[in-house]
Amino acid sequence: MSKIFFDANILLDILLPVRSNHTKAKLAYEKICQRYMDLATSENILTTIEYIAYKNGTSCETLVRFFDGLQTNFALYSFTESLNKSLAYYKESCEKGEKIDFEDLLQIQCAIHYGCDTFLTEDRGIHTYAQGIKVIGLDDVLKNPIELEK
């Protein structure tokens, strides 16, 4: 069975009705849950979710329920083991004069380290760092959910 890693933007889209992809993210989540039991994200993403959701007026009670749901339904991975590789990629990128989003880099390397074969995100720039993992977006899930299983 495939392991699917959810990026922060997807989880925020599910949680926050004010986000433009809210409905699409909820529909995609339902489709994924019908086919997969192995859902994952990083424990670091929880800090990002709390910060952004709270700034958008989400109550502590709602966040607690959301976090409880994540703990129940998702594997929450640490990126400690993938940190050195991420730092090396970041250094290499800086030496080339290229801009790299370190948070995205950490998440994709965490997913790869823990054997996830699919990474769900709306960040298209993350593809550059996706070695050995399929990077998909919400439209990919909604248009052709059968493809997710390959």
Image: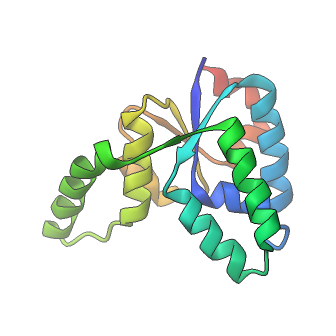
As drawn, is 137 to the left or to the right of 59?
A: left
Q: On the rendered image, what quadrant is the C terminus found in?
A: top right
Q: Looking at the image, which residue is at 75% across and 33% down?
A: 32
Q: Position of residue 107 (x, y in %)?
A: 44, 51
Q: Position of residue 95 (x, y in %)?
A: 13, 67
As drawn, is 26 to the left or to the right of 70?
A: right
The residue closer to the viewer here, 60 or 75, is: 60
- Residue 138 to residue 116: above or below: below
Q: Residue furthest top?
A: 1
- Residue 101 to residue 131: above or below: below
Q: Looking at the image, which residue is at 30% across and 45% down?
A: 82
Q: Residue furthest left?
A: 95
Q: Looking at the image, which residue is at 44% across and 59% down?
A: 104
Q: Position of residue 133 (x, y in %)?
A: 45, 34
The residue closer to the viewer here, 91 or 12, is: 12
Residue 21 visible, this orientation: no
As drawn, is 105 to the left or to the right of 142?
A: left
The residue closer to the viewer here, 83 or 124, is: 83
- Residue 133 to residue 103: above or below: above
Q: How is the image coloured?
A: rainbow
Q: Looking at the image, which residue is at 81% across and 66% down?
A: 61
Residue 36 visible, this orientation: yes
Q: Position of residue 109 (x, y in %)?
A: 37, 45
Q: Quadrant of residue 23?
A: bottom right
Q: On the rendered image, what quadrant is the N terminus found in?
A: top right
Q: Quadrant of residue 93?
A: bottom left
